[in-house]
Image: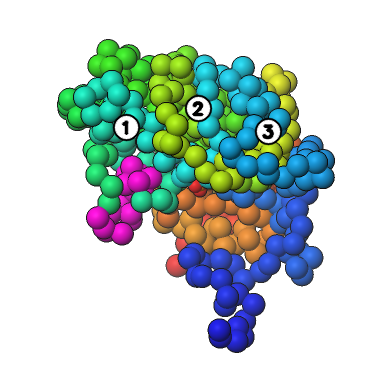
Amino acid sequence: MTDATHPFDALMEITARPPVVFVRGAGSYLWDDSRKRYLDFVQGWAVNALGHSPPAVAEALAAQANRLLTPSPAFYNEPSLKLAKALVANSCFDQVFFANSGAEANEGAIKLARKFGSLYKNGAYEIISFVGGFHGRTLATMSASGKKAFEPLFEPKVTGFPKAQLNDLDSVKRLISNKTVAVMLEPIQGEAGVWPATDQFLRELRALTKERGLLLIVDEIQTGMGRTGKLFHYEHAGIEPDIMTLGKGIGGGVPLAALLATDYASCFEHGDQGGTFNGNPLMCAAGLAVLEYVAKPEFLKAVTDAGLFLESELQKLSARHGLGEVRGRGLLLALDLKLPIGASIVAEAFADGVLINSPQPDALRFMPALNVTHEEISLMIDCLDAILVKAGAARRVA
Ligand SMILES: *Cc1c(COP(=O)(O)O)cnc(C)c1O
């Protein structure tokens, strides 16, 4: 045991964090331990669908905490049955397996596809995924990801994830063989910098996978639960995938994720899948509270409206400062900066009390609470505008 001299020393250093401690959150705002207030357009990394500590989720958690925490994953509990039923009723899927993180849900999707291959496709196991894709940080999900920085890490990786190019159907066709069982993608590549698959590509991919007897897996961990203005992104393209994963927003701030499959794809047998905390009533109670809010048509309409407002304000900002395009859908948007100034803008906004994210050096990403107001969007834009004015003046002097 070492005597930790600094309050941060006892935590493994796995990323660069600003040296403040956050102590409270409400809606679109966070406070640190010096009582400084921040307008939050990161929201736990697109996690807090209803903002920080929403009363609906806090009350559902408190009520469930006082009733039943964990009977055991070998027994049924009410919240998981209700949430599974509600997810099935609101989607094209028939069955749900709950997980505790997005990566774990994706591991489940990969295992389910491989099981399908072993049962019905002569042991086919390859899952075509995409350059730029991100599916999590377990060994298999890092292997499925198409992230350059992951390539040299933790060798040997899990094999069987050939990579195609997003929005290039021929690149998918070229990789299909008798070993292929599925194609897996994010409808919008979030971590790569908000790069959307076109609706046309999603439709073509669905047609191709159907024709070749392959499963289509959509990773909606970032795009699902209303983030893009529909409950699930696949609805925009009018397709029905075979398997979907959810995470982030589904718990409204607590660790909950889900693997959903159609009857056709749902083929686990006893012993194939499980986990101690999977489907525990506490997290499922939170998920139920979130879904009841988010699935309402008027809520999704408000997400669409807020997304269009943010998009048009970002476009105006871009025109004013000679920046690049605005990408994405609903409340998952990125602004192309055309220059590698993302990190410095994020740092200045942080100092000014606004939290944004730069997923790539030349892009900013916006993932506010789904119930963010137009006023909060305008405040964030004003902050960015002032930073860009200063940066422009500095460039002209230099
Ligand atoms: C965040 C994310 C994951 C991983 O989820 P964790 O909960 O961090 O394991 C997987 N896929 C996508 C698209 C994500 O955005």
First in sequence: mark 2 vs mark 1: 1
Q: What's the CA distance linking mark 3 and mark 2?
A: 18 Å
- Residue 154 x %, y %: 31, 59
Q: Nearer the viewer, mark 3 or mark 2?
A: 3
Q: Which mark is residue 260?
A: 2
Q: Is mark 2 within 8 Å of ligand 1?
A: no
Q: Are marks 2 and 1 in contact (CB under 8 Å)?
A: no
Residue type at numbered disc 3: Asn
Q: Residue at x 59, y 52 (%)?
A: 356
| CB-based contact (under 8 Å), mark 1 and mark 3 | no
Mark 2 vs mark 1, CA separation in Å: 15 Å
* SS state under label 2: strand
Q: Is residue 385 visible?
A: no
Q: Magenta includes 319?
A: no
User: With 344 as the anchor, is 155 left or right in this view?
Assistant: left
Specify the amino acid type for callout 2.
Leu
Residue 381 in the figure: left or right of residue 163: right
Q: Which residue is mark 1?
A: 114
Residue at figure coordinates x 26%, y 33% from the top left: 125
Question: Which image quarter: residue 86?
Answer: top right
Give, as a single range, the part of the protein colored magenta. Answer: 140-156
Instruction: Tell me the tag on residue 77.
Output: 3
* 300 is higher (above) or lower (below) than 21: above
Of labels 3 and 2, earlier in sequence is 3
Q: Position of residue 326 (x, y in %)?
A: 49, 37
- Residue in the foreground of this view, choosing between 211 and 109: 109
